[in-house]
Amino acid sequence: MGRRLSSRFVAGFRIEDAMSTATALGAQGLAVTLDSLGENVTSPAQARQAAQVYHWLLDALAQSKLNANISLKLTQMGLEVSPDLAGEIVSGLVRHAAEAGSFVRVDMEGSALTQTTIKLVRRVHAIPENRDHVGIVIQAYLRRSAEDVAALLADGIRIRLCKGAYQEPPEVAFPDKKDVDRNFVALMKALLKSGLFHGIATHDEGMIAATREFAQAEGVDRSSFEFQMLYGVRRDLQRMLVREGYGVRVYVPFGDQWYPYFMRRLAERPANVVFLARNLLRR
């Protein structure tokens, strides 16, 4: 089962494996976000080592000319060791991305880190040469997300909108799917009307249909946003959207930390077990 999970949802252990997967996806008309697996480092040396992998990736992507960028977690960049350390490391990566004409997506983790993550991204984005080279993730199931989206859009920050995958208490996150979906659609509409390029990250066909319908009704060009999905999940849907002329970016994790990555996700939220099991059976 471990081998099946790693081969289906993780693109190998090395940078070379990730680049090979990115090239294959690019040949299918798909864009890519590469994520070097790892989080919750416990020393500055571990954080800098994790960052070095991303510097190598940015160099490799610049040479490849692929439509690809990188995605990282702040706890992997040393946030829990020192917020100043994480800020320094992320600033260096965004500076490198700007020089390479690339982009850094800062992932969102549990709600205890939401405010810290937003604050750091806004600070890094405020540096003029970093504008348009760093973005963030917003989770629609958090009750605070509408206010966060408004503040981030005012700063001109690009957003990846997803539903959210962590287990959160009901006072922090909507417990019912219908409320999460309602908030997702409301936030999606705000993003598409903002004039910035955002990612609508979902495998939910209802949310995809709502996005397409709203874009058509409002005259939002298909090239002004993209759908985003996980590697190995709903590959049929990815191909269908590409055929219809929509941009689709695939989130591609890689690295030898795949086992703790899966175990954390499965432990955090029981629904993740069902989600992965269903997609193991899909073509």
Image (tube, helix red, strand yellow):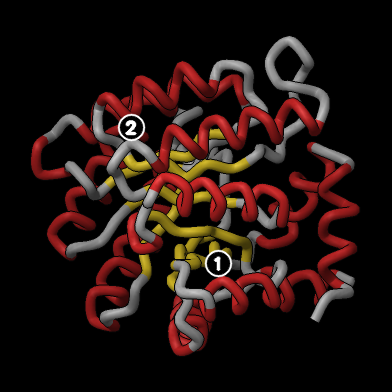
Query: Disc 1 on helix, strand or loop?
Result: strand
| Residue tagged 1 | 252
The residue wearing badge 2 is: 121
Q: Residue at x 80, y 81 (%)?
A: 283
Residue 222 drawn above or below residue 125: below
The disc at residue 107 is none
Q: Mark 1, residues whose alpha carbon is within 10 Å: few (<14), some, or many (≥20)?
A: many
The N terminus lies in quadrant: bottom right
Q: Position of residue 252 (x, y in %)?
A: 55, 67
Amino acid on which disc 1 is placed: Val
At a point 61% along the width and 72% down the height, the residue shown is 238
Note whether 241 is above or below 129 in the view shown: below
Disc with the residue nearer the chain's start (2 vs 1): 2
Name the spot of residue 66 as percent of width and height, x first: 33, 78
198 left or right of 61 in image: right
Q: How far across and how far down the image is residue 164, in percent?
A: 66, 37
